[in-house]
Image: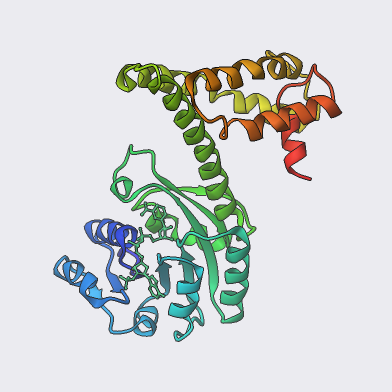
Amino acid sequence: GKTSVTLLGLGAMGTALARTWLAAGHPLTVWNRTPARSAPLAAEGAVVAGSAAAAVAANTLVVVCLMDDASVEETLSGADLTGKDVVNLTTGTPGEARARAAWAGGRGARYLDGGIMAVPPMIGTPGSGGYVFYSGSRELFERHRETLAVPAGTTWAGEDAGGAALHDVALLSAMYGMFAGAAHAFALIRKSDVDPAAFAPHLADWLGAMAPSVHQTAAQLRSGDYTRDVVSNLAMQVAGTPTFLRTAEEQGVSPELLTPYFALMRRRLAEGSGEEDLTGVIDLLAR
Ligand code: NDP
């Protein structure tokens, strides 16, 4: 039969996860701090536990999807974790994940950490592009892979328990850089009454066309040769930055989202070679 699952946390994400396991025929025991959130799932076939400890006791596989690491500690401290397979899908830092893995190990549990790269509507929706990074116990990952694949795709991020959180936060950090760039672009065009809806397709296409440049960055980082296959070198790009700042000024838009990156580009040019790509900026950040 299908693996029985215990799920702690029935927020927006936990509820979405719960529904996919129920729909796929996995026996499911749930617990939520605010009991009212369990009622709809009980009607759909979930067993509602009276306490987190009782929910943990019900099954070997214990999936946790709570607000933050502090709520995970608070929720699991009263439970007997001996022999449990704890899969923590709560978002946190890599350091928190490593510490939680050691904490769970000290209480006799195996531990797998997860970083969910999806919003609730993507859960249980094949083809949505949503998936979960997993890191920590490879043995636990292999044992429960089929069950874990029910809500979303599974991507291995290494034996370091912090790996899933690291990949998750790194991707979301890049996303915020993209959002920042898009915010500046919209601010510029809005000042000239360009229709945002007419501009958006150009923006989406351009960001899409530029995105594969990360592969070249990766190749340069691997080889240590930042001049390899350079298309637009650092000297040329730094020379172009005044155009961006003057355009912002002409349009009456604050350059504050652009200037930190430009400052790093200029510092790298001052310290290194103008023949390089922008990859050297990464070295400055790593100091
Ligand atoms: P919600 O705010 O909808 O739910 C939070 C859950 O945490 C609730 O079940 C809440 O219980 C519980 N909780 C909070 N504090 C405590 C505590 N001290 N003790 C016990 N339970 C507690 O959040 P989501 O379900 O959306 O998110 C859950 C996790 O999933 C988070 O780590 C989030 O970062 C991650 N995630 C969410 C995404 C999203 O788009 N929603 C996307 C990717 C990851 P109660 O009902 O009693 O308040």
Q: Quadrant of the N terminus?
A: bottom left
Q: Quadrant of residue 260?
A: top right
Instruction: Tell which of 33 and 48 is nearer to you.
Output: 33
Q: Quadrant of residue 16?
A: bottom left
39 left or right of 110 in image: left
127 up-or-down from 203: above or below: below
11 left or right of 96 in image: left
285 left or right of 82 in image: right
254 up-or-down from 105: above or below: above
* Image point (48%, 71%), residue name: 85
* Image point (50%, 38%), residue name: 175
Instruction: Tell which of 129 and 60 is nearer to you.
Output: 129
Image spot of residue 58 (x, y percent): 35, 80
Image spot of residue 112 (x, y percent): 53, 63
* Residue sticking out furthest to the left: 43
Confirm whether residue 223 shows in the render: no
Q: Quadrant of residue 222?
A: top right
156 up-or-down from 36: above or below: above
Which corner quadrant of the figure contains ligand 1?
bottom left
Confirm whether residue 231 shows in the render: yes
Image spot of residue 82 (x, y percent): 51, 82
Image spot of residue 70 (x, y percent): 50, 73
Instruction: Tell which of 165 and 109 is nearer to you.
Output: 165
* Image point (79%, 45%), residue name: 287
Instruction: State how the image is colored.
Output: rainbow
